[in-house]
Every structure is written in structure tokens, then in C-alpha cells.
Amino acid sequence: MPRLTRVQSRNVDQIAMETLGMPGIVLMENAGRSAASHLLPWLEQPFGSVGCVCGRGNNGGDAYVVARHLANHGVPVTLYTTGMPPAGSDASIQADMARRIGLPMVTLETAAQLNQHARAWAQHAVLVDALLGTGFQGPVRPFLAGVIDAINQCSDPQIVALDLPSGFDADAGACGDTVVVADMTITFAAEKVAFAQAGAQRWVGKVVVADIGVPPWVIENAAGDGKGT
């Protein structure tokens, strides 16, 4: 599979929705379920707990799906949200489903809340980074930069990034030190072009590709402008 730029990653979703008739929420569900299947083998039984740090966008929406499927397998999961997704969005629907099945949701919208709840992250076996996705272009906003710093200060849990580490640009890579340092990155559909840059492994760790339910030709067509690798 080719590596994808930010625009090409967006094109994968567009082709899937417009040509295949796959709604965005189906793609989100497929991505999150696939990511959960990659996470489960990392968790020793009896399952250690997982914390998911969720942004307001689709990356956070993916994490709500991951959390729900992990919980269905008996994994204790806590959601830490930096703000609820926009009403009516795919991510909002996923957040509501996670709430309805009773997953704990902790609000991280102020520095005081972050300082209070980040102390609990050491209790988790895995901390999932789902703050910023492929649409991110720097700089990171100050509060989210503080959340990223708090994630990086955790020494005990394994850090798993969804799609790419928050603060890592899909095209340009790490443009500063405000980037999540992941032990593993579960990226969706295909690797991103910046993963091939020198030094990228420091941020992305081990990379695995999660299936989002589209045939290979969708990814190849999305990369057809020749700008992928």
C-alpha cells in the first residue's frame, strides 16, 4: 500500500462515502473496531485498564469506538475528553453510545482538571492518544499542548496513538517537541508519508495498519495524484 498524505487520507474517506456509499460513521466504526482488535493482544489477562484521551474531532470519535469494543471484551476503560464533539457529528454519535453503555467519562477542559486527573493515568496499562488526527496542522493550541506534555510524562502505561501521534503532522512529521511519544501507532487504512522520515520512529513507535473496510483500490485511487510514497 502507498503511504498517504493528509489530503489523500481525506480522499480515502471521500471515495468510500461517495463511490461505495459507506457513511462516515461506518468508516469510524470499522476503524475503531479494527484498532481495538490490535490493542487486545497487548493487554495481559486479567485485563489491565485502558484510558482513552479524546479530542473533539473524528480522532476522538475513533477512540469512543475503541473504548466500546474493548469494554465489550471485559477491559476496564475510562474516557478522558477535552470537550464533547459537535452535536450531530459522527464522533458525537459514538460518544453518546459510549455514554449509554456506561463507560466512565472524565472532563479535561481546564488546567485544574488536567492536573487532577492526569495523576490517575499511571494506573492504566495502556493510554490511548486520540487528541489530534490527520487533519492537524500546527501549532498545537496551548491547552492541548499541556495534555500532550502530561501524556509524555507518564512512565508506566504503554502509549498507543490512533492514526498518528497527536502533534505529528501527517505530511511534515514532528515540527517541534509538542508531540506524543507513542510506543505504538495504530494508523488507519495506510501509513502516512511522514512515517518514512528520518527520526519518525521516535514519535510513532511500532506502526500497525488498521483496516477500515475499504478495498485496496480505494487507497490506491486516493493516492493516484503521485504525491504519496
Image: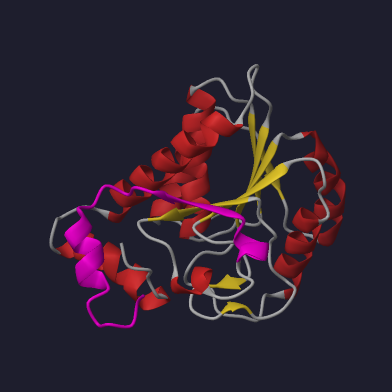
Residue at 55 percent of width and 59 percent of height? 56
Q: Is residue 194 left or right of residue 204?
A: left
Q: Is residue 224 above or below residue 180?
A: below
Q: Is residue 109 above or below residue 141?
A: above
Quadrant holding the C terminus: bottom left
Report x, y in % for residue 148: 73, 62
Q: Is residue 35 left or right of residue 179?
A: left
Report x, y in % for residue 70: 52, 30
Residue 27 visible here? yes
Report x, y in % for residue 157: 74, 41
Q: 122 and 58: which one is in front?
A: 122
Residue at 48 percent of width and 78 percent of height? 171
Residue at 33 percent of width and 83 percent of height? 227
Q: Determine the image quadrant of residue 45.
A: top right
Q: 12 and 64: which one is in front?
A: 12
Count of all numbered marks drawn on residues in the image: 0
Report x, y in % for residue 197: 55, 75
Magenta residue span: 201-229
Q: Is residue 215 magenta?
A: yes
Q: Is residue 90 magenta?
A: no
Residue 99 visible here? no
